[in-house]
Image: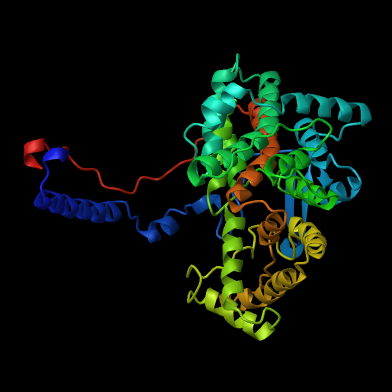
Amino acid sequence: MPKQENMKVEDIEELKEEMEVLEEQLMHNHRIDPNLYLEYDVKRGLRDANGKGVLTGLTEISDVTGYELSNGRQIPSEGHLYYQGIDVCDLIKGLEGRKYGFEETIYLLLFGRLPDQKETEQFHDVMFELESLSSRFVRDVIMKASNQNIMNAMQRCVLTLYTYDDNPEDISPKNVLRQSMDLIAKLPLIAVYSYHAYRHFRLDETLFIRNPEKGLSLAENILLMLRPDRKYTELEAKVLDTALILHAEHGGGNNSSFTTRVVSSSGTDTYSSVAASIGSLKGPRHGGANLKCQKMFDDIKANVKDWSSEAEVADYLQKILDKKTFDRSGLIYGMGHAVYTLSDPREVILKGFARSLAEEKGRMEEFALYDLVERTAKKLIPAHRNTFKPVCANVDFYSGFVYTMLGIPQELFTPLFAIARIPGWSAHRLEELINAGKIIRPAYKYVGQHRPFAPLDER
C-alpha cells in the first residue's frame, strides 16, 4: 500500500474501492443464517420463545412483576417493582415530606433495609463527605479532553478514579462497599462538571463549577450545581428525587445490572465494573431510550397541527408504526415493556409528578398531548401487531418530558439514569461477589466451516 503522504488521486480511489469490497465481505462473512437460531434453540438476547428472560441467577435486591399465575397461565396484571421486598409505590408514599428519599433508597439497596433515624443522619453525613472531587481531578481529568457525550466522559472519569484509590484491587465486600459509596456520591459531580466542561470548551459558554452544599439532598445539589442562578422550587427537587428513586434499580435481568454481574464475576475491580455498566446503559435500547422518546415527541409536535385532535394524533402514530415517518423504525418509543403488561408502576408515579410539574410550569397543553399519545398508542400497537397482549407506557415515556421541564439538558438525560442506577449496580456487585462461585460464561455454538491454513503466496 502506498504511503499516505505520497498517495495520488488514483491511489486514493483504488483504496476506496478496496475498502468497499472489504465491507461487503465483512457483512457477508459475519451474517449467520437466522434458521440456525431455531435449529439449535438459541435463546437470543437470553430470552425464551415468549420473550421471557432466561433464568441465570438469584437475587434478593429487587423484583419486577407484570403477571399473575392462574392455573399455570400468565394473566396480565398491574405492574409492581420491589426494592429489597418493599413495593416502590409504598416507598414513594412513605417518603412523602422527606427530601432525602433517594439517599434512604441507596441505604435500602445496599444494606437490605431502611435506616432508622440515627442511621439516616450518619449515612447523610458520610455521603456528604464523599460528595466531593479534588481540584486536581477536576482540572486534570474532567476539564481536559472534554466530551460531547457525557456518558463517555463519566466512563473515563470513573476509570481514572482507580489511580486515586490507595487500595483499588481489593474486592472484599468491605472495600467494595467503600468504593461503591464513594462512586455513588461522586458520579453526580462528574456528570454535571463534565457537562459544564463540554459547554465551555466545545460551545464557548461561560464556565462555572459549584461545590455541593451540606444539608441539601443529592437531587437538590444536582439542580444547584447545574443552574446558573442556583435556584429551584421544592416541587422540582421532589420530582427529581422521585425520578432518581424510580430509576435506582430494576431487577437483575436488565442489561446494565447483568453487565455488572458478568464483569464482577471475573474478579475485576470496582471501577472497571462500573465503567462497563455505564457503557451498557449508554445504548439507545437501554438507558438512552428516554432521549429517543423525547425526540419522537419533538417530531410529533412539529407535524401534528392540532395536539388535541384524537384523529390527527392517531393518524400520525399509525404512520410511525407503518415506518413512514420519524426514524422509520416502526416503533412508538416509550410504549411496551418486556415484563410489565397493564402498567409500569414507575410510569404511573412519574406521570402524576409530570402533571404537577406541568401545572407549575404552565405546560398542561404538552402534558395533554403526552396523555393522548399514551392512550392512543395503547390501542394502535396491539391492533398493528395482531396481538391480544396489552401494551403499557414505560418509565421512559414521561421521564424525558419531566427532565425537560426541570431544565435538564438532553446531554444529561442518560447520565441522570446512571446516577440513579449506580446504587443498584453496587448492590448487585456486592451480591455477586459474596455469592458467586464461578465466572459467568455463556455458551455460543460454532456454525462456521473448518478450513485449512493457506500460505501468503497461495491466497
Q: Nearer the viewer, residue 400 or 30?
A: 400
Task: Write down the quadrant of residue 258 in the picture.
Answer: top right
What is the x, y in percent for residue 201? Answer: 50, 40
Residue found at the far top of this picture: 166
Q: Position of residue 93 (x, y in %)?
A: 89, 50
Give the image location of residue 174, x and y in percent.
71, 19
State whether residue 126 is above or below residue 156.
above
Q: Provide residue 189's location: percent of width, then percent of height.
A: 66, 34
Write the residue at 60% across / 15% down: 167
The residue positioned farthest toward the left in the image shown: 457
Q: Is residue 122 left or right of residue 384?
A: right
Q: Is residue 198 left or right of residue 4?
A: right
Q: Vertically, is 304 above or below 285?
A: below
Question: In the rendered image, which quarter contains the N terminus?
Answer: top left
Image quarter (top left, top right, bottom left or bottom right) of the C terminus: top left
> Relative to 352, does residue 270 appear above or below in the rendering?
above
Whether residue 65 can be seen here: yes
Query: Taking the image as drawn, is residue 395 in sight?
Result: no
How are the colours assigned in the image? Answer: rainbow
